[in-house]
Image (tube, grey):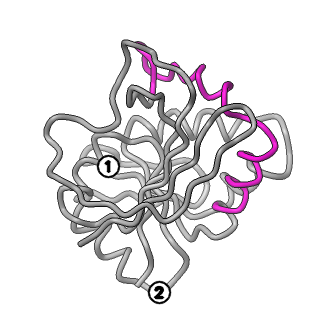
Amino acid sequence: MRKLIMWNVITLDGCFEGERPWDLSFHELVWGPELEALILGQLRTAGMLVFGENTYTGMAKYWQSAGEEGGVTDLMNSIKKAVCSTTREKADWNNTIIVKDAVSGIQTLKNEDGKDMYVFGSAILSQSLMNAGLFDEIRLCVAPVILGKGRKLFGDELNRQNLKLVESQTLPNGGVVLKYEVRK
């Protein structure tokens, strides 16, 4: 069985995007060679990327038209992907399958042999998967900023999650990468 891992960049006050959809300007505060190397390492070990509907739409739009070749762009476009959506009929980003029932579909994919699965962004989907006990790890990069207003990654409808810190890394730009194991 492969692991299901959450990866997100968040602010100190828990936002994964600003007040407007796709306001990710705070990512610039933590971006640098160290975070790029960490992300490339994660992508190289990923067997599948998992997205909710909104995150999939934005990521597909961005990565399919990213002008640079190599590195993150090539990996994002070549890795298998799953979009969890009850309404989507077609997925046009390379190597994407549609999962209609997120909890049972991701559990089935998780039970297959293969490399780990990563969920990026996708707060609504992540909450469903967390409440179903499907995550094995939560990895966060905390940006050194408090937005005050924005969309929180962990909402009020989330069940309690017991975590164990297994690794931390301070970035030269003030960001902190945290890796938690989810205790079942």
Q: Horizontal and vertical percent for residue 56?
A: 47, 42
- Which residue is rendered at x = 68% and y = 60% of the image? 78
| Vertical relation: 93 (above or below) 115 | above
Q: Horizontal and vertical percent for residue 40?
A: 73, 56
Q: Dot 1: within a 10 Å radius of its alpha carbon, few (fewer than 14), some, or many (20 or more) residues?
A: many
Mark 2 belongs to which amino acid? Asp
Specify start and end residues of the magenta stretch as a single range.
Answer: 17-42
Asked which secondary structure carries label 2, the reply is loop
Figure disc tally? 2
Asked which secondary structure carries label 1, the reply is helix
Q: In which quarter of the image is residue 110?
A: bottom left
Q: Horizontal and vertical percent for residue 114?
A: 52, 82
- Residue 126 is tagged as 1
Q: Horizontal and vertical percent for residue 121?
A: 44, 41
The front one of 129 and 27 is: 27
Q: Dot 2: within a 10 Å radius of its alpha carbon, few (fewer than 14), some, or many (20 or more) residues?
A: few
User: Are the residues at dot 1 and dot 2 in contact (C-beta closer than 8 Å)?
Assistant: no
Q: In which quarter of the image is residue 31?
A: top right
| Vertical relation: 9 (above or below) 26 | below
- Which residue is rendered at x = 34% and y = 45% of the image? 88
Mark 1 belongs to which amino acid? Ser
119 relative position to 70: left or right: left
Image quarter of the C terminus: bottom left
Return the residue at label 2: 113
